[in-house]
Image: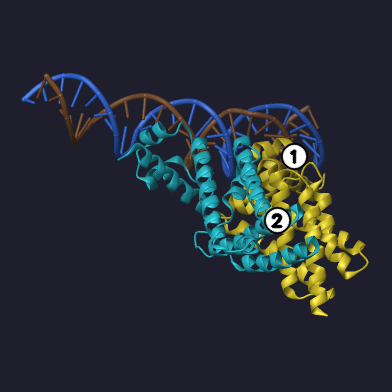
Chain colours: A yellow, B cyan, C blue, D brown
Amino acid sequence: MEVSEIRTRIVATADELYNAKGIQSVGMDELRTAAGVSLKRLYQEFPSKSSIVMAVLERRHEAWTDGLDAKVREAATPRGQLLAIFDYLSQWFCQDTFRGCGFINSFAELGAVSPEVADYARGHKASFQEYVGRLTKEAGGPPVLAAQLSILAEGAQTTAAIAGSPDAAGQARQAAVVLIDAALSTAS
Amino acid sequence: MEVSEIRTRIVATADELYNAKGIQSVGMDELRTAAGVSLKRLYQEFPSKSSIVMAVLERRHEAWTDGLDAKVREAATPRGQLLAIFDYLSQWFCQDTFRGCGFINSFAELGAVSPEVADYARGHKASFQEYVGRLTKEAGGPPVLAAQLSILAEGAQTTAAIAGSPDAAGQARQAAVVLIDAALSTAS
DNA sequence: TCGATGGGAGAACGATCGTTCTCCGTCATG
DNA sequence: CATGACGGAGAACGATCGTTCTCCCATCGA
């Protein structure tokens, strides 16, 4: 078995477990068992649990970025691309493994005691806002629209997570339509 | 010293510590020292840590509800009352102790392993959405507007917490103005 | 003054966590 | 076949946590 394959399997397993139970609730032994890797191998690949946490965050960032971008590219118009963000949220919320944004959760759990985690979560959210900013600019909207749509997306994630229902995605999408149309009509 | 005064001091101290460091990062000994109470007294007042956590959540719910309602009552018009929600968020975000919504944080930290915490967070968010629903109805807006404004408020909280900046409150308020005006003009 | 009561400080206990170490079987190589 | 390196399973270790127990002193009524 490839060394990198073991790393991938460890990180993928940790991602699932941390998402389902929270980071602090999952011990190294549980991760070891679930990943089917010996403890020695585990510490051979990662020097500590916190390094696994950071690797999981990187994996989540890539999965989010790639999945969102793929969904956005399906849309034909710039306006449709902005709305595709909320379609992506909707299909995400409908997965039964959905338990809220992993960055919000990890920030809430470890942000106060781990500057690494806090910085990475901040960077992830900043990159999302920049991404929405680019789409907004292409659609001819003002920067404040990007901030507003980003806030809507954030709120939809936490609302859907706590309520346990995917309804927030559709409601946020409706709000996005109103905000986009209002911004584009006054901008022109 | 009154018995209830000790309870209040314990819960107030736990609220501060849990908010600043997260629940799982604060041990009973640290709480005992910060509250200036003996460990025996602590367990005389509360049977376990989880009961303290629930008491903190109740305290947070009351503080949120009372503070928000007081701010809303300052507004003269129903439309102003809806916007007052975001003024309340703004002044909250500007406090240097702000570290995100305590219910979102506790849900992220313990929701997966503690049904009590998850249920209480769900109930708190549901009561907020009902409150916004009442204000929206008084303003003559449709139910979907209440859901959208609630999502905006949620998103502002997480965005402000992770970004470490209170800007999201003003941006969400601007979005609320657009959504409210659009909903009220089409509703009439 | 004396003895009982109650509360404070913190030691102790069992569990669990992250991390390291030990033992043992296996396999490759001469 | 002998030997030595390697990897897996899990015991062990130190730290920390929630919780309980023990000791001691201070107070108060008789």
Is B86 placed above or below B109 here? below
For mark 2, name the chain.
B
Residue in view at x 38 percent, y 39 percent = B4
Is A69 placed above or below A29 here? below
Residue A3: in sight, yes or no?
no
Q: Secondary structure at mark 2?
A: helix
- Which mark's residue is nearer the viewer, 1 or 2? 2
Residue in view at x 35 percent, y 41 percent = B37
Quadrant assignment for the C terminus of chain B? bottom right
Towards the viewer: B48 or A112:
B48
The amino acid sitting under disc 2 is Ile
Furthest residue in direction bottom, as rendered: A188
Q: Secondary structure at mark 1?
A: helix
Which residue position holds label 2? Answer: B151
Residue C9 place in picture, x, y as percent: 30, 39
Residue A120 place in picture, x, y as percent: 66, 60
Towards the viewer: D29 or B62:
B62
Residue B167 place in picture, x, y as percent: 62, 69
Residue A69 place in picture, x, y as percent: 84, 62
Residue B158: in sight, yes or no?
yes
Mark number for residue A35? 1
Towards the viewer: B42 or D12:
B42
